[in-house]
Image (tube, rainbow, N blue to C red):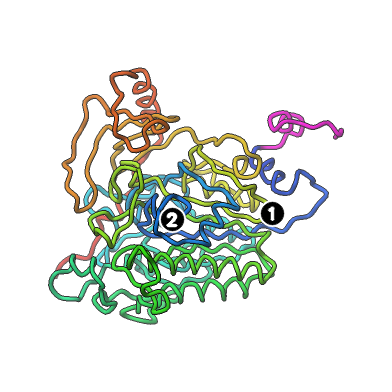
Amino acid sequence: MSDKKYTRREFIKVSGMGAASLSLLGVLGCDTRKSQAKPNIIVIFCDDLGYGDLGAFGHPTMSTPNLDRMAAQGQKWNSFYVAASVCTPSRAALITGRYPIRSGLCSDERRVLFPDSTGGIPETEITLAEALKKGGYATACIGKWHLGHLPPYLPTEHGFDYYFGIPYSNDMDYVGGENAFEKLRYRPKSHYWNVPLMRNEEVIERPADQNTITQRYTQEAVQFIKQNKNQPFFIYFPHSMVHTPLFASSEFDGVSRRGLFGDVMAEVDWSVGTILQTLEQENLAQNTLIVFSSDNGPWLSMLQAGGSAGLLRMGKGTTWEGGMREPTIFYWPGRIKPSTIMDMGSTLDLFPTVCALSGAEVPKDREMDGYDLSAVIFNGLASPRETMIYYRGEQVYAARKGPFKAHYITQGSYGMGGERTEHKIPLLFHLGHDPSEKYNIADQHPEVIQEINQVVEEHRKTVRPAEDQLEKRKKKA
């Protein structure tokens, strides 16, 4: 090949290489003569963290110096989405790269898995961990799983070599007596919830001591990094926090101007800093991609014990922006140039992006919903994601194309009221001009609604709903 400088499109044409291969070359400096170790991948996933809950995303009293440094030195994504606004389906989408309607991990009635659930992630689904494991990666899940607590559904049955964490949300298995909802909000006691802590398939502590759980998750992650530093590794690190009930260790009690929620988030930020420090000490930082995000927006009915969506509308449980647009950071020292990305991305995109970087294969025998973001992350090109479908349970409530978002059905947040309303003429918002979704402009742009309708119709043609896993439960005696 000559010394001519090619554009991305020209290079694909003259070389015959695919986009994923080119993305990987972008990471390697477009020089095939150099060998490069497969990158380590760490995905840190908070629980119920709102768009406005980090210093880097505008919170005035939240101290998150490590995450703020990652945002300043890496990429801060302003328009990054999860595929559902509650725990189980959101996590299913990340780990499979597919809308949860395809795996049966969403439901109109029981929106998440519970301790009496008998369903979970189907054996037929291919997880990101399974794809990476085939490529020689050591894999660990550390934290809240919530894709099934029975043996066939645990992380170690779905591509993870190691698991340490709780199998479902930290507010389940309540045994604290009356006023359960109030006890979520105000200085709770860990023993009010009989949540199990597991190592691999074994329950090692019950109830889990949630006061120290963030510290113990972090210790496990550090140990896994050190044990596997001589081979590529993937750590999926879904924190239990800042889902209520909130718990912080004694070292973080009272450290934040934001109260208990801020204390808990300060400890999560410490955890992130500890991971960064470990990578630097082990000379792994420049070969490790870290992605930080959250599973859904803030639980607004928890009042001060809940988070904030900033200027976005509503929160957890809804298809308004506050429920599904999450504060997201991509960080890779020496590889990612500091920037703010305003294009769309999604947790659905992590599967193909990580596969492109690692050389792992994206499944070709099923409908996948993600895009490879490598060209955005490393080459500064536009995001391939131009649309987003907003599901609530098994139904499409809204859809976005470019800057426009149409709402077909609207409904309020958990515990905050707001009746379900079907709109004969969809509500339409320009999210660039109006990220708070205040000003309905449907009458001004009927042609845009038609375009978004077409996006939804094309999506629906690809959907073959799977067996509902969330409705499966133990029969009452």
Answer with left or right where residue 455 lies relative to residue 336: left
Hey, what amino acid is under mark 2? Leu
Residue displayed at 21% across by 25% down: 424
Specify the quadrant of the image occupied by residue 173.
bottom left
Checking the image for residue 293, the label placed there is: none
> Does 170 appear in magenta?
no
Specify the quadrant of the image occupied by residue 475.
bottom left
User: Residue pushed farthest right?
Assistant: 2
Q: Is residue 91 visible?
A: no
| Residue 366 x %, y % | 48, 43
As helix, strand or loop, the secondary structure at mark 1 comes to: loop
Callout 1 environment at 10 Å: few (<14), some (14 to 19), or many (20+)?
few
The answer to which of 232 and 444 lies nearer the viewer is: 444
Callout 2 environment at 10 Å: few (<14), some (14 to 19), or many (20+)?
many
Image quarter in which the N terminus is found: top right
Compute the Cα span from label 1 to label 2: 24 Å
As helix, strand or loop, the secondary structure at mark 2 comes to: loop
Question: Up-down: is 240 above or below 412?
Answer: below
> Does 12 appear in magenta?
yes
| Residue 70 x %, y % | 56, 56
Closer to the eye: label 1 or 2: 2
Q: Which residues are magenta?
A: 1-18
- Earlier-in-chain disc, 1 versus 2: 2
Checking the image for residue 54, the label placed there is: 2
Checking the image for residue 334, the label placed there is: 1
